[in-house]
Image (tube, rainbow, N blue to C red):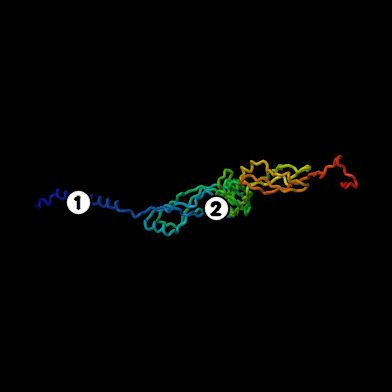
Amino acid sequence: MDKLFNSNWLVRLTALLFAIALFFYVQSENNSTRSTPSAEQADVIEDVKLEVYYDDENLIVTGLPETVNVGIEGPMPIVMREKLAKDYKVFVDLNSLFIGEHRVTIQTENFSEKLEVTVYPQVVNISIEEKVTKEFRVEPEMNSRQINEGYVLKGMTVEPNYVFVTGAKSVMDNINYVKASIKAEDGITESFKQQANVKVLDRDLNKLDVTIQPEAVDINVEIDEYNREIPLTLKQVGQLPEGVTINELSLGQESVKVFGPQSIVDSINEIIAELDLSGLTESGEYEVIIQKPETPMKLSDEKVTVHADITVAEVESEEVTAENPVTDGDTGEE
């Protein structure tokens, strides 16, 4: 037994077993370490407002997003704290830049030094231009198909008539229209007033990125019944009394307004006023009724005056013949 324990082979075997055991222990620890969740965390803060520093009284900057996303990575407690505290700032400082095109990097402040911070997008292309303000007349517009048949748009007035438009010089040079549009339901039959937003458009009717003051105007819309002046024609009916001769007949007015649907009113060429000749007994003015077209039309006048210049012949009451002469002093008695 003592020989066995004093053997070099036994010592070597024991050392080998210890080495093998140590190897498996280290492997086990490494696997355990890899399977433990990391204390590092990555997150994204969305829609962070981008602050811009420049001379906003005289310059216009285009190309910058209003908000950006910020990625942060680091110890989980610090990541959570930054998201809740919101003490950070994301900005671009353009005060040292001149008018023209530039490529700028978005910067950050007040993030923990233990965090890795990335802004999306990190670099943007911008344009710095001169700020221009001009005064424009507002043009009101309305879809005439919204007006009921039988009515017509008589006119529109805007209050105020002019607005101030401010924008980059290149944008201002592309302004073709400054409009305010009426929004109404179909079947309009009466005048009304409505407030409408002002739109600034280029020649292709694309909305331009400008500032408008005031942004809205009041529009007075005047609606009237559709009407047209149509000539009056005098029509003679009946028989003249015995001994009456017409020298001249004339109407007191040449036309009358006819109201109604445009398709019907425009198809009328004349309006008739009838004069009954049997009622002419002397020269003077006679009032006659104008023939009204079928509904739904109406006339501006229901009657018209006719001036008649006539001659009335004298008619003897008794006929004198040679067989029955009348002499002075003859009383007709025997």
Disc 1 secondary structure class: helix
Judged from the image, the secondary structure of the residue bearing numbered disc 2 is loop
**Other-residue count near label 1 (Cα within 10 Å), few / some / many at <14 / 14–19 / ≥20:** few
Which residue is under mark 1? 18
Q: Can you give x and y, in whole percent of width and height, for residue 318 in the image?
A: 82, 44
Q: Residue at x 73, y 42 (%)?
A: 239
Q: Amino acid at mark 2?
A: Ser
Question: Hey, which quadrant is residue 230 in on the image?
Answer: top right
> Residue type at mark 1?
Phe
Which disc, if any, is residue 96?
2
- Residue 40 position within the rendered picture, expressed as x and y whole percent measured from the top left: 36, 54
Residue 168 falls left or right of residue 109: right
Number of residue marks:
2
Q: Kindly tell me whether residue 41 is visible in this rendering.
A: yes
- Residue 303 spot, x, y in % from top left: 69, 48
At horizontal 65% and vertical 46% (from top left) the residue drawn is 292
Disc nearer the start of the sequence (1/2): 1
What residue do we see at 73% from left, 44% from top?
278
Q: Which of these two is toward me, 278 or 323?
A: 323
Q: Name the residue at the left extreme.
A: 1
**Horizontally, is 290 left or right of 175 in the view?**
right
- In the displayed orientation, state which residue is furthest to the front: 334
Label 2 Cα crowd, 10 Å radius (few <14 / some 14-19 / many 20+) = few
